[in-house]
Image: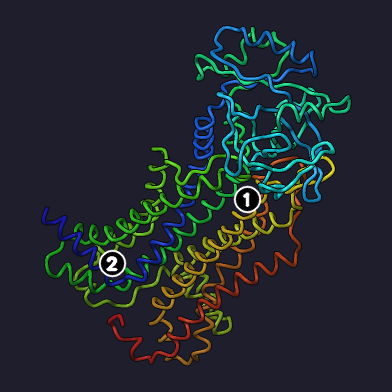
Amino acid sequence: MGRLILIARLALRGLRRHLLQSLILVSAVTAACGAVALGMTLRDAAGQSYAQIRAATDGPDVMAMPIGTGDTALHDLTPLFDLPGIAAHSGPYPVAFPMVQAHGLTVQAVVEGRATTPDVIDHPQLTQGSWVRPGGAVVERAFALALGLHTGEHLTVAGRTFTVTGIALTAAAGPYPSAEWSPQGGGPAQSAGLLWLTQADLRSLASPQLPLSYTANLKLAEPQHAEAFANSPSVQAVRVNVRAWQDFARDNADGLRPVHDAVTVGSWLLVSLALAGASALVAGRMAEQTRRVGLFKAVGATPGLVAAALLTEYLAVALAAGVVGLALGCLLAPALSDPGGGLLDTAFAAPSAGTVVAVAVTALAISAGAAIGPAWRAARTSTAHALADPARAPGQHSALAAGAAWLPVPLMLGLRLAARRPRRALLTAASTFTVTTGLSAILTFQAQPPFRLDLGASTLPDPRFVLTHHIVQGVIVAVIVLAVVNAAATAWNAALDARRPLAVARTLGATPGQVTTGLIAAQLLPALPAAAIGVPAGMGLYALLQVGPDAVILPSSAQTACMVTATLLGLAALTAAPARLGARQPVHKALHSEQN
């Protein structure tokens, strides 16, 4: 117990001594874990929201619509109600498929006739206003949002004007644009919205050009077997189309595929950047704690105790960030699981056990992957060597560094600095590749024409596309922020590690400007090929995730060139600040053995 308390106290003191770096690490791990939690919780949230609205509206277990229209449709529905396994039913309700005009738009709609009092089965839940009355219409919420309708406004149905008395949600039909699930009987084959009128108002609109069909809602004795009931031979023998409640729940989840893909790609990018940023921050902190490690060992700390104390700092930070990221993902998932606003609002999506485990593994993998190597190397350092804190020895002399002698001084210094620390060069390349891949994929997404839904005479934006666009914008911001943090941390560590070799170069005649340019070149040399590879990788990533047969439209060469140039210039600018500070430091201080 005493060792655990000691490790905890040492870790807490380390966190206090480096509060800003700890906060940066928390932010990076939180963003990555939040994206992972959001991606895994998203589809579960859609299912949870549909289950809640189904319970709140006493939604049906099976929905039925005949193939024909008029009296034939009623005749076809009648045998369905006498089948075994049906506990209750509501309807049949008249249904028509007219054109609706509102705010200058003319769109397809599914209009269902209801009584002025709510039914026991499927009583749509009002979010605004009141239920149907003569001359009044209730509009499904996602459809109302798409048309910009509010209670008290007017819309025209088949040439007749009605007042919007309410906005409601239902589990008996898909939200806009998927209100019509059975195009037989004159219904629209693709996108449409849903609204309700009184049965008398709807019947008054009927004509040879606007025939009535019907729909009915069924309650089963065993709701969990609704799909088996819908596929049973006795149901299939009736001339009706039927759908189980599980089909609607599945459709809600499947409609989220573009949104889910955008979040998933964003989580990949953020995890990669968080790992790179954590590695840079940990490397910098370990370099600053060399003498502290020597002091620990001088007073009797074993290598295992030193490594445990150093690792505990990062594991504690990662777990705290993982908890915050999990909570953020669960808070955002309900909003993103309902692009059109057609499901019940929920404040929090309960995470599954798999989501909790995945977030914990992600947080620990980021911290452990960044910290295990440096912590173990620090623990194995001899006490005398750690207390002396000499300059870090370069890696094995390479032919690349030897050939740099014939290059201009700044490029020679940059090439030798990159060659002496190949792991840092690889880290810079990996971070640049991740950033350019993500930005290239985002540019390719932005180059595609906006998708609009054809609702007859007018087109409307697809709410899923709009939400995906907003998610992409959020990913852009998160990627840029993490990339800036990574580049700044890597540049600072590079400047810290290169103080002594660059001081030696200055004693041999290199100017502060050449030293600064050399350190910038050391960062840009591995970044250049990584950026060149990241551009086609991002385009390929978008093509891999694209839904549909349409050819991918690539961004213009000018846009791609500007993106790559801005990335490299940003990296150079972030490196220039610590490089200039190091170049202005007196040579004798840089050559001093202790860390400043």
**Is residue 138 or residue 566 the one in the foreground?**
138
User: Residue at the location (50% across, 77% down)?
Assistant: 575
- For disc 1, the marked residue is 467
> Secondary structure beneath disc 2?
helix
Counting residues from the start of the chain, the first of labels 2 and 1 encountered is 2
Q: Where residue 381 sits in the image (x, y, percent)?
A: 25, 66
User: Residue at the location (82% across, 30% down)?
Assistant: 205
Furthest residue toward right: 208
Q: Quadrant of residue 143?
A: top right
Q: Amino acid at mark 2?
A: Leu
Give the CA distance from mark 2 to mark 1: 39 Å
User: Residue at the location (76% across, 30% down)?
Assistant: 201
Task: Describe residue 267's horizontal placement relative to residue 376 as left or right.
Answer: right
- For disc 2, the marked residue is 15
Give the vertical position of 430 relative to 46 (above or below): below
Q: Where residue 175 sits in the image (x, y, percent)?
A: 64, 37
Task: Describe residue 135's horizontal placement relative to residue 1 as left or right.
Answer: right
Q: Where residue 562 sits in the image (x, y, percent)?
A: 69, 69
**Is residue 182 or residue 527 the one in the foreground?**
182
User: Residue at the location (75% across, 67% down)?
Assistant: 558
Q: Amino acid at mark 1?
A: Leu
Q: Quadrant of residue 115?
A: top right
> Secondary structure beneath disc 1?
helix
Q: Where residue 214 sits in the image (x, y, percent)?
A: 73, 21
